[in-house]
Amino acid sequence: MPRTLIVGAGISGLALAKALLDRGFPVDVVERRADDGQALGAGLYLPANAVRALQGIGVGDEVDKRAEPVTRQSLHDRHGRPLAEFEVSRIWGGVGRCLAITRGDLHEVLRTAVDGTVVRHGTELSSVAEGGTVTFADGTTEAYDLVVGADGIHSAVRRSLFGGPEPRFLNQVCWRFIADDTAIPGLTDWTARLGSNGRTFLTVQLGGGRVYCYADINSSGTTAPAGDWRGLFADFGGPVPHVLEQGADAHFAALHESENTVWTRPGAVLIGDAAHAFSPSMAQGGAMALEDALVLADTLTTAPDVTAALAAFTTRRAERVAWVVSQNHRRDRTRNLPTPLRNVILRRAGERLFRANHAPLHALP
């Protein structure tokens, strides 16, 4: 079995480590951040294919204990008037349930599932050579049969070994935070409220009196607009003003998308955001990362050697990832239509569009 180094102890890296360890592979995981036990980010909506992948990795039952079921999706205009509402079972059929969870809880489930001795925190990668020789920031080197870049959108593995274009700015910026919803009426399941200029305010129930909040706008630059960002949503109605009162310290990010579609080199592969960062429009970033982990573990187990495994991995993942990219673009274009036209389209065909977006993802990856 190939000796494997996974660079990055986020969701994709830990999921792959769990899948490989369960199959008896010798695995090391390195993470440049110190082990403070805290995961970056706020909340996650896990569509049914992500939940299915977590079951395949063997942590689905534990995730269920910490997550909140999402049974309904609603699209409203900025005043709170409904545009489209539907049960998620009508989108996903027999694939399974959709869940919402804090990023910290999901990360903790995966951390607990992986033997802590395989993860070396505070260890930064300096370079990777084709064939698997790794140089760390402290000058030490080690040789591996396979190096996996699971180190996010700013992947050191990708920069060192793959080259290619840097992720492309999507002309969108966002804010994320978790609010206490115990005194705020009108917050249920998954609800997106759409304004002009591409503005979206999403709330997803997390259970336990918590709600995950996500807001984004179109932007020509990657820095946060001057002033209090919450003023950008001052014309939104319903529960939004009350939720925004808790968003002063929201996490800000500029949104990017990967343009490099080369994910493998001899003895190396990229997974998750290191391979394919997405627009968040379909909430498939985490799902694709978890599927990557399962598929890579499967191809490494069944292929005769690493080279064949990586070729099989690309074959199984390329079309599916390309579909998600194309559907993200389609949804983002719809969101940015003139407001009256967008609202008419969503009222008449919102559920049908969501079903079409997700239909190919019903099949196993």
Image (cartoon, rainbow, N blue to C red):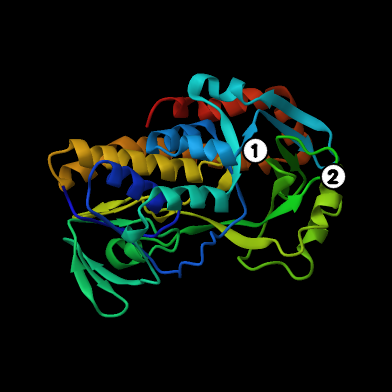
Q: Which mark is residue 334?
A: 1
Q: What residue is rendered at 45% in x and 37% in y?
A: 54
Q: Position of residue 58 (x, y in %)?
A: 40, 37
Is residue 149 visible from the viewing direction of this image?
yes
Seen at 47% across and 52% down, the residue is: 277
Residue at x 65%, y 24% (from the top left corner): 351
Q: Is residue 325 left or right of residue 313?
A: right
Q: Which amino acid does label 2 sit on?
A: Ile
Q: Is residue 339 left or right of residue 293?
A: right
Judging depth in this view, the residue of 115 and 126 nearest the camera is: 115
Q: Would you name the residue on which mark 2 appears?
A: 184
Q: Residue 156 at what x, y percent from top left?
A: 36, 66
Instruction: Evaluate if marks 1 and 2 touch, with contact meaning CB atoms under 8 Å apart.
Output: no
Q: Which amino acid type corresponds to the residue marked 1 in the rendered image?
A: Thr
Q: Residue 269 carries which label?
A: none
Q: Quick one: quadrant of the C terminus?
A: top left
